[in-house]
Image: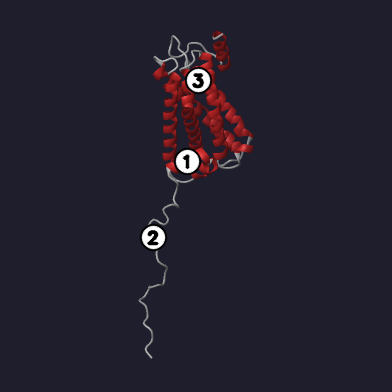
């Protein structure tokens, strides 16, 4: 009998190769995907920082934070108009940036004290994400602030509205921070809660240092030093 033909060497020895692009989703997430994680899934956003591309992500987050701060600053400046059209956006962007820079070293120390192993680059990306989330929320709330700015002439009332919106945005930003940092869950981390309170105090004092934001003054920057609660008290008394 004639034996069956032998298949050529290597034929059917290995399974068919996967179609082109089959593994294309196994690589690091893109910046757009990470922005979606930033808004809805802070834990996954924090884990995504461990891959490559953190530098480009941080650049995109910082650009978003600065752009959003400028856009919201236009709404703040629309209350008084004039020089505040450009002064308020620049002051808000500068104030948020300086607050983050001043508070970043203490956040790194607090993270180390709680046993978290995190690189300063990843920590900076989380802080940039917090700022980006803050200003995205502020930008979404800008129409609410605008309608009040066009319907009231009270500097104290308008300042109170902006303060409430800042507290709301900061709350979501702190939620991102405490959940996105690699390591122990921040919801049960007292050190991170203390840092969030410190950052909020620094941001409030920074905006007081760069006043006026809502109203007007004879000079672009203040010539008198004030604590932010002292400034608010004086503003409230002058509006009565």
Residue under label 3? 207
Quarter occupied by the N terminus: bottom left
| Residue 73 falls in image quadrant | top left
> Which one is nearer the viewer's eye here, 162 or 145?
145
From this view, report whether residue 57 is shown above or below residue 161: below
Residue under label 2? 19
Pointer 3 with pointer 1, Cβ within 8 A: no
Q: Is residue 118 visible?
A: no
As measured in the structure, the alpha-carbon distance from the residue carrying label 2 to the one carrying label 1 is 28 Å
Residue appearing at x 58%, y 30% in the figure: 195
Residue appearing at x 46%, y 42% in the figure: 34
Quarter occupied by the C terminus: top right
Q: Where is residue 202 shown, x and y percent of the image?
A: 54, 24
Neighbour tally class for label 3: few under 14, some 14-19, many 20 plus, Cα within 10 Å: some
Label 3 secondary element: helix
* Disc nearer the start of the sequence (2/1): 2
Q: Is residue 51 visible?
A: yes
Q: Where is residue 15 shown, x and y percent of the image?
A: 42, 68
The numbered disc on residue 36 is 1
């Amino acid at each position: 009998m004639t034996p069956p033909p032998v298949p050529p060497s290597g034929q059917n020895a290995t399974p068919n190769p996967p179609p082109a692009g089959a593994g294309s989703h196994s690589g690091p997430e893109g910046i757009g995907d990470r922005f979606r994680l930033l808004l809805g899934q802070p834990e996954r956003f924090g884990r995504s920082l461990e891959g490559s591309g953190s530098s480009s992500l941080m650049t995109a987050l910082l650009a978003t934070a600065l752009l959003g701060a400028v856009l919201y600053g236009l709404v703040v400046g629309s209350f008084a108009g004039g020089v505040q059209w450009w002064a308020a956006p620049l002051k808000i962007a500068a104030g948020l940036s300086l607050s983050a820079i001043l508070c970043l070293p203490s956040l790194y120390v607090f993270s180390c004290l709680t046993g978290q192993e995190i690189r300063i680059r990843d920590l900076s990306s989380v802080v940039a994400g917090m700022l980006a989330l803050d200003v995205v929320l502020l930008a979404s709330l800008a129409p609410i602030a605008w309608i009040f700015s066009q319907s009231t002439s009270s500097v104290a009332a308008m300042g109170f509205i902006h303060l409430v919106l800042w507290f709301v945005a900061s709350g979501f930003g702190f939620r991102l921070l405490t959940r996105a940092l690699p390591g122990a869950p921040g919801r049960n981390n007292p050190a991170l809660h203390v840092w969030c309170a410190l950052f909020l105090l620094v941001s409030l004092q920074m905006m007081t240092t760069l006043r006026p934001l809502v109203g007007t003054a004879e000079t672009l920057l203040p010539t008198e030093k004030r604590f932010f609660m002292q400034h608010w008290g004086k503003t409230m008394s002058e509006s009565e």
